């Protein structure tokens, strides 16, 4: 059971993939200039390759409120919910980019942009995988409480 992590930004979408056992998340790639329809086509291909869950990072404010960006990301998530055989989980992504940049700086690979986007997607996906593995509950539609 593989999961896909998605960090949906205005210009780029970071993508991460879990191992087949759903324990570890790995940065995969960064997609550029892609709209919700093209993202859906991309995810359909990943479902054919064995992905069963898409974890979409939801950008909340530090107080937990949703703004315009969260609304835009939810529209992408709704488009993905039409993919047969795919569970879509919207997951709190607060501080994922900060964590991704920290990780990349530690290994000497930090650069604003492509690497940080895919690494942020891996942070989001790993958070979801860890919470699921240790049995922390999730809210409605799989959202982090």
Image: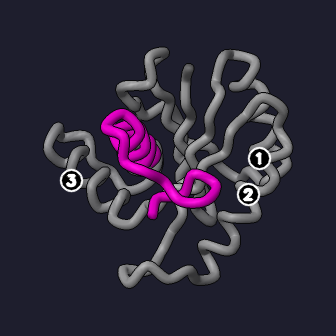
Task: Please check the rendered image and state whether residue 135 is part of the magenta-colored stretch, yes or no.
Answer: yes
Mark 2–mark 1 distance (CA, rounded to whole Å): 6 Å
Task: Please check the rendered image and state whether residue 110 is part of the magenta-colored stretch, yes or no.
Answer: no
Picture coordinates of residue 94, whole percent (x, y): 39, 66
- Quick check: 25 above or below 68? above
In the image, 47: left or right of 8? right
Q: Nearer the viewer, residue 47 or 135?
A: 135
Picture coordinates of residue 60, whole percent (x, y): 48, 74
Picture coordinates of residue 84, whole percent (x, y): 84, 32
State the residue position of label 2. 76
Circles 2, 1 touching at the beta carbon (< 8 Å): yes
Question: Which residue is painted at 41% across and 39% down in the image?
Answer: 132
For the N terminus, which image quadrant?
top right
Mark 3–mark 2 distance (CA, rounded to whole Å): 27 Å
Picture coordinates of residue 62, whole percent (x, y): 36, 80
Q: Sequence order check: which comes first, mark 3 or mark 2? A: 2
In the image, 96: left or right of 104? right
Label 3 neighbour load within 10 Å: few <14, some 14-19, many 20+: some
Label 2 neighbour load within 10 Å: few <14, some 14-19, many 20+: some
- Give the residues drawn in magenta, as a range: 121-145
Kind of element beneath mark 1: helix
Q: Sequence order check: which comes first, mark 1 or mark 3? A: 1
Mark 1–mark 3 distance (CA, rounded to whole Å): 30 Å
Circles 3, 2 touching at the beta carbon (< 8 Å): no
- Quadrant position of residue 15: top right
Kind of element beneath mark 3: helix
State the residue position of label 1. 80
**Total number of numbered labels?**
3
Circles 1, 3 touching at the beta carbon (< 8 Å): no
Q: Is residue 115 visible?
A: no
State the residue position of label 3. 102
Q: Colour scheme of this structure image?
A: one colour
């Amino acid at each position: 059971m593989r999961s896909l992590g998605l960090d949906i930004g205005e210009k780029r979408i970071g993508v991460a993939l879990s191992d087949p056992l759903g324990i570890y998340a790995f940065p995969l790639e960064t997609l550029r200039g892609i709209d919700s329809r093209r993202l859906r086509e991309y995810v359909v291909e990943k479902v054919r390759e064995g992905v069963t869950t898409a974890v979409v990072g939801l950008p909340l404010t530090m107080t937990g409120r949703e703004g315009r960006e969260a609304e835009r990301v939810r529209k992408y998530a709704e488009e993905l919910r039409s993919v047969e055989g795919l569970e879509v989980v919207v997951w709190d992504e607060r501080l994922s980019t900060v964590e991704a940049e920290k990780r990349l700086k530690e290994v000497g690979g930090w650069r604003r942009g492509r690497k940080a986007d895919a690494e942020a997607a891996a942070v989001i996906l790993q958070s979801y995988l860890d919470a699921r593995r240790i049995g922390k509950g999730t809210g409605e539609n799989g959202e982090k409480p």
